[in-house]
Image (cartoon, grey):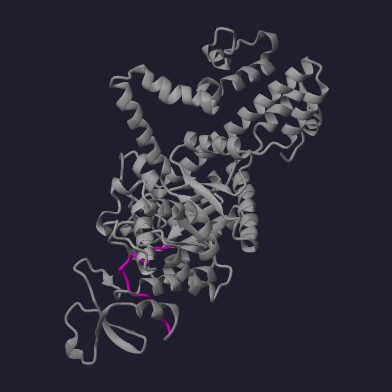
Amino acid sequence: MSLKYQEAIQEAGKAQGLFNPEYAARIRLQNRFKTGLDIAKYTAGIMRRDMAAYDNDTSKYTQSLGCWHGFVAQQKLISIKKHFQSTERRYLYLSGWMVAGTRSKFGPLTDQSMHEKTVVADLIEEIYTFLKQADARELDLLFVELDKAREAGDKAKETEILGKIDNFQTHIVPIIADIDAGFGNVEATYLLAKKMIEAGACAIQIENQVADEKQCGHQDGKVTIPHDDFIAKINAVRYAFLELGVDDGVIVARTDSLGAGLTKQIAVSREEGDIGDRYNSFLDGEEVTDLSQIKPGDVVVKTAGKIIRPSKLASGLFQFKKGSGIDRVVMDCIHSLQNGADLLWIETEKPHVEQIAGMMDKIREVIPNAKLVYNNSPSFNWTLNFRKQVFEEWKNAGKDVSAYDENKLMSVDYDNSELAAAADEKIRTFQKDASARAGIFHHLITLPTYHTAALSTDDLAKGYFGDLGMLAYVAGVQRREIRNGLATVKHQNMAGSDIGDHHTEYFAGEAALKAAGKDNTMNQFDAH
């Protein structure tokens, strides 16, 4: 914490009134961050330092898990601190898919920007509210230990606890927040970006799809926009950061061009070879050599020195040339980094280190320190993809693969095979390998707890409503919480009951009516 415990007490003691300066200092330390902008500035600094560290050492990549509720985010950070004693290089991701699928008042929606735009900023605020409460709870536990050490006259213990308070590491970490395609025009993008930053977002991810045709990155029918239109939205986000004083704010420019074969409009081009002309050069179409080739309603465009009639669908959308995706991705990424973006996101159809590296190698020929945020998506069948990769590698190396049916590699029959073990090892090291080879600074899973919630609920429901009855909960949940040392086993404490008791004691003294007496059943969990 920036303010040491004794310093906070001295500072509080300067105020007028009948109160205990030490209690005032405790409350102050329990809420270090007063506004979302405080959080955005603090976490932007973390991201910038981590980006610089990665440039010097690719083993220092960062990671995050997606979350759809403040409690889920809180438990992730509590677990991280418990298991690793540090939140260093560990972030949170806020997925537009997750918001659409779980948080809209319309009910579950597909990832097409149909949900209320304000729910994105609301979720950021909710997450940080829960993370600040995690700070308050952990510090409250330390204050209790401090009081016990003093009551026991244990100076060594008192000094130890004071050291923990002074060196307390907050649960507040950066959130990379998904603004989809901007939810409308550039003004709409700017206004929503401001709301997200005011809620605490230090990094905003925006994609180059058409806002009103937006699709999930792993679905078909994606439609991109010309580069100038995308750069205008990047500018809108940057101006939002600058207006609010978050000068280190991070913009992640996402390209969906690898899987997007359509555009809604012809790019504006002012001269041959400019970015608009290069965008148009990828349009599929017929070269026009005679005016008689032009029919009513046709559009023609001069690009790359030729006049073409772009292929146009009944929807009015224009098609790109087959096989042009990689070249368009490279162009997107270079242009975005040259015009205000800080990080890249390339949406791919599979997790393949060499595919990603092939694109990043081309980008880094122009911008050597280009860095990626990569979606380790649950939309990929990781088991099947990596078994296929190992199968191909073995076959190309001349290894005997006759024991495996290439068309049934997902079969449970192969789960304990040598091929499955090799594939699992490649999955285990994917993030490390991709960060070293393909310039991936940040690895995230968009919707992990969507799946973990479904899986754990399935396990509980199967047992509880079946033969196990209450034992399904006790053995499968509560006893595991106890054995694993999860704070949630004392759910009253987790929700802030003890914090409230201590605050009541600060405010009311001996007259305080507290919940944590001897008859509180949470005391049962103190037994070992």
- As for residue 506 lying within the magenta part, the answer is no
* Magenta region, residue range: 255-271
48, above or below 261, in the image: above
Near-viewer residue (103 or 333): 333
Where is residue 363 drawn, in percent x and y?
50, 72
User: In the figure, residue 469 lies in which quadrant?
Assistant: top left
Dividing the picture into quarters, in which one does residue 34 lie? Answer: top right
Q: Which residue is most to the bottom?
A: 290
User: Image point 44% across, 78% down: which residue?
Assistant: 275
Coordinates of residue 470 in the picture (x, y in percent): 36, 17
Q: In this view, does 460 lie to the left or right of 369?
A: left
* Percent of width and height locating residue 311: 23, 76
**In front of the other: 228 or 359:** 359
Give left or right: position of 432 versus 30: left
Q: Can residue 123 be seen in this view?
A: yes
Q: Which of 300 and 356 is in front in this view?
A: 356
Q: Residue at x 64, y 11 (%)?
A: 512
Quadrant in which the N terminus is drawn = top right
* Residue shown at 65% from the left, 58% from the top: 53
Q: Quadrant of the C terminus?
A: top right
